[in-house]
Amino acid sequence: MWLRLYKPVLAGCAFLWLVSGAGAEPAVPAATDLQRDGREALDRQLPIVLEISTAGCAYCRQLEQEFLVPMLLSGDYTDKLILRRLSLDSGSPVTGFDGQPLATVTLAGRYRTRMTPTLVFMDGHGRELTERIVGINTPELFGGYLDACIDTALQVIRNPAGTRAVAGCRPWTNGTGN
């Protein structure tokens, strides 16, 4: 009798688990409205880190699985950044920092993105704060370099006069911001 009751209960629990989304793999939130994200970044004095990626890019998946998603799940970066993913092959328009709809490839072109993955560190107006990170060429050192760029971006936002390179990540210096 227990066996007959056990199977339906187990199946019901598995169904509820799947329906609740507990089995869904966490992901970096998609960039849909950069104007809204920009206002939040300005209010909270945080940089926006925009991951520019494509669906078929193995290095993009590696970046998300080994670095970005663990950062989100840890909770340690809640007061350090706003993280968004711009998928070049999504086909959905994105609201730009100026409130105008843009194709994802147009937005990526504004930041002169040539390869994926690319991480762009920007302020609430869409101006670049630090040098960008293109690709993953040394996974063993990548986390430290990523943290250095986040710290540099925070420093540029919160103390522009005292801005300096942090552990190898230089502030953006072209004068135009992007």
Image: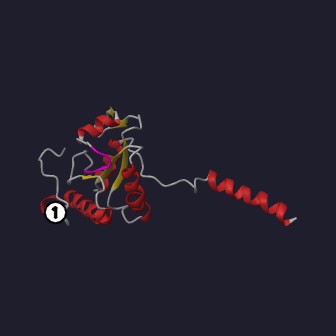
The residue type indicated by label 1 comes to Ala
Classify mark 1: helix, strand or loop: loop
The quadrant of the picture occupied by the C terminus is: top left
Q: Residue 160, percent across and down? A: 16, 58
- Taken as a whole, is the magenta stretch helix, strand or loop? strand
The residue depicted at 44 percent of the width and 62 percent of the height is 73
Q: Is residue 86 left or right of residue 22?
A: left
Q: In the image, which residues are magenta?
A: 115-122
Q: Residue 78, percent across and down? A: 38, 61
Residue lying furthest right in this view?
Answer: 1
So how many labels did they put on this image? Answer: 1
Please name whichever residue, 114 or 77, is drawn nearer the observer in this view of the structure. Answer: 114
Q: Residue 51, percent across and down? A: 33, 49
Q: Quadrant of residue 75?
A: bottom left
Please name whichever residue, 169 or 101, is drawn nearer the observer in this view of the structure. Answer: 169
The residue depicted at 33 percent of the width and 43 percent of the height is 34
What colour scheme was applied to this rendering of the protein?
Answer: secondary structure
| Residue 120 lies in the magenta-colored region | yes
Categorize mark 1 by other alpha carbons within 10 Å: few (<14), some (14-19), many (20+): some
Q: Quadrant of residue 71?
A: bottom left
Q: Residue 91, percent across and down? A: 41, 34
The residue depicted at 88 percent of the width and 64 percent of the height is 1
| Residue 117 lies in the magenta-colored region | yes
Query: Which residue corresponds to mark 1?
Result: 165
Question: Is 133 placed above or below 91 here?
Answer: below
Q: Is residue 67 left or right of residue 113?
A: right
Q: Is residue 6 left or right of residue 171?
A: right
Please name whichever residue, 22 or 163, is drawn nearer the observer in this view of the structure. Answer: 22
Question: Is 52 placed above or below 80 here?
Answer: above
